[in-house]
Amino acid sequence: MKNKRAQTTMDHSGDYATSAVPEDQRKSGVNLFVTTAGWIICLSTMFTGGTLISGLSFSRSIIAAIIGMMILTLFAAPLAAIGGKFGVSTTMLTRHALGKTGSNIFGIVNALLLGIGWFAWQAAFFGLTLSELLPNTFLVNPIVGALIGGVLMTITAMYGYKGIAVLSFIAVPLIIVLSLFGGIAGIEQTGGWNALLAKPASGTEFTLFAGITIVVGNAASGAVVLSDITRYAKSAKMGAVSAAGGYLVGGVFCILCGGAMAIAVNVPGIGTTPNLPKVMLAIGLGIGALIILILAQWTTNTANVYSGALGVGTFMPFRHKNIVLVMGIVGTILAISNIYEYFIPFLNILGTVVPPIAGVILADYYVVNRLILKKDYTFGPGTKYAAFNWAAFSGIVGGAILATVIRFFTPAFMSIVYAFALYVLLVLICRGMRIPYSIGTYTESETGL
Amino acid sequence: MNITYNRNLALLSIVFGVCNLIPIASESRWYCVLCFAVLGLPGILWALPTLRKTSPQALRALSWVNFLSGCSILFLALSDFYAADGGMIAFNFIAASGFVLCGIWGLYTSTQKLGLPLVP
């Protein structure tokens, strides 16, 4: 795909919230791959490895991890390619798919879900992790750890993509090396590679399909906003390749190392989830465990608040770093006051409506625009968008409901598939019956707002 | 000018890389041998072509390799599982601190003196 970026310069936000990333600001393939991998490699992915080995043998866990990540790549790579092609954020992409008002709604949902909600949850979890790893220090109080984590993550995100990229260049290689040697320690303590492969499930067995479901369900939501990073790619192909590489290399590797470590030592889990900090300590990783856990959460949560703020920047005339700062402060206060726990049911509801948005974006670009309307997206001053695309919203709501009602595979992924199909179907029906599937028109101003 | 920076950093990388390989001589645990080799060799192997390169990009790349190798060596040397036997652990600490300092110096030079961005 050839680049078709909006011809706008630096926007009001200071981080291209409402315009395309200029050609000279785009990054190398290595930079994109490392930053995308930093986004994908997170603690929950390592925990997934531990969960897999509780119900599958290690060899079957490998298969589940590879197939699960391949499924994620199937929709994450095309999504990342759109970001790479046009150089705009996910919220900007939704202007075409959802209309301007719909895009604003997505920006708000994304800010509440990622920028504040999950940011607060992750910061609080960061505090808990530190208190577990360093019980004889001042960090035994999780509030102190949550405060430190919240401040560090917010400051990094205030530097925008550059901050995330530098952090990822430090974090990703260190996490990979330390996890690799953690995995090797796991292999050694299990009795060798063959013993590890033959090791049966450590808990109640489940099917390979259930294992794949766990892998896909864990990471499906995060893939929706991948364009916020891949917009810095030099081409659509580079965006897609970096996303695919991040999932297939970083994701699979993280799951397998988490599994290898969890299988080696018998540490009581938290429900079906392994207590990975304790596992890493028991395996003898020492400070390496601390480094992995800190960096994995740091990269992920910085990306959360970054993406949340980017969405808000598409309709509010504030600098990106100021939006990050406000979100970071609110999220950190929620984390240290434990109020975030009351928001978790609300976050879960929001979490069910975000993944189908990916289905609608993919359907709108690849099917409705490219195949049916035979046209391409454009961005920049003067571009006309619908004010509200009700067919897209029906697809999102329908996809979320269907995935909740029809219990097949993982709801997060299936809601994407349902939303994709529903939206295309609605557009075809509306076009056949000559009914408009969007309401009103919005013309992009010079500021992009 | 760059050739001096690159050559100096490359020579130091080789020295510290070899330093990390020395504990292999008295190590019987296969996973520790693997650890010392995997973390010591990148500094050496990356330094060899850098000896002839003049670009600031080569300096920055080797600096990143050094910094990350040094941090990894340090964290694993401090763990129970990968700590070298007896006094040999001193070589790991020398290699780790050397790599980290070289990495920081190289990154500082390539960004502040040679005008490159911190990440490629």
Image: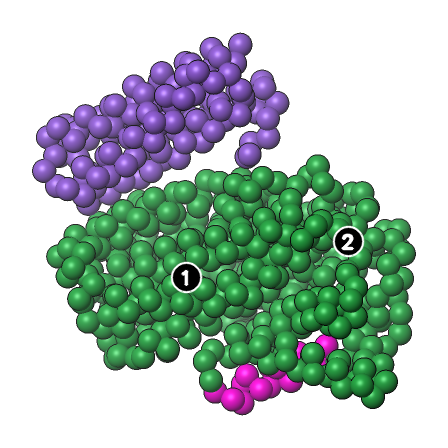
Q: Picture quarter containing residue A131?
A: bottom left
Chain appearing in purple on the rendered image: B
Q: Which residue is mark 2?
A: A18
Residue A165 percent location from the top left of the image? 55, 43
In-image side of A353 versus B96 (left or right): right
Instruction: Kindly tell me whether residue A228 is visible in this rendering.
Output: no
- Measure the alpha-carbon separation of dots 2 and 1: 31 Å
Q: Magenta region, mostly helix, strand or loop?
A: helix
Q: Read off the chain for label 1.
A: A
The structure residue drawn at horizontal position 30% and vertical position 48%, both measured from the top left corner, is A180
In-image side of A148 versus A84 (left or right): left
Q: Amino acid at mark 1?
A: Thr
Residue nearest the observer in this picture, A389 or B69: A389
Describe the element under mark 2 as helix, strand or loop: loop
Visual hue assigned to chain A? green
Residue interval drawn in magenta: A392-407
Residue nearest the observer in this picture, B18 or A69: A69
Q: Which residue is mark 1?
A: A45
Residue B96 percent location from the top left of the image? 31, 29
Q: Amino acid at mark 2?
A: Thr
Mark sitting on residue A343: none
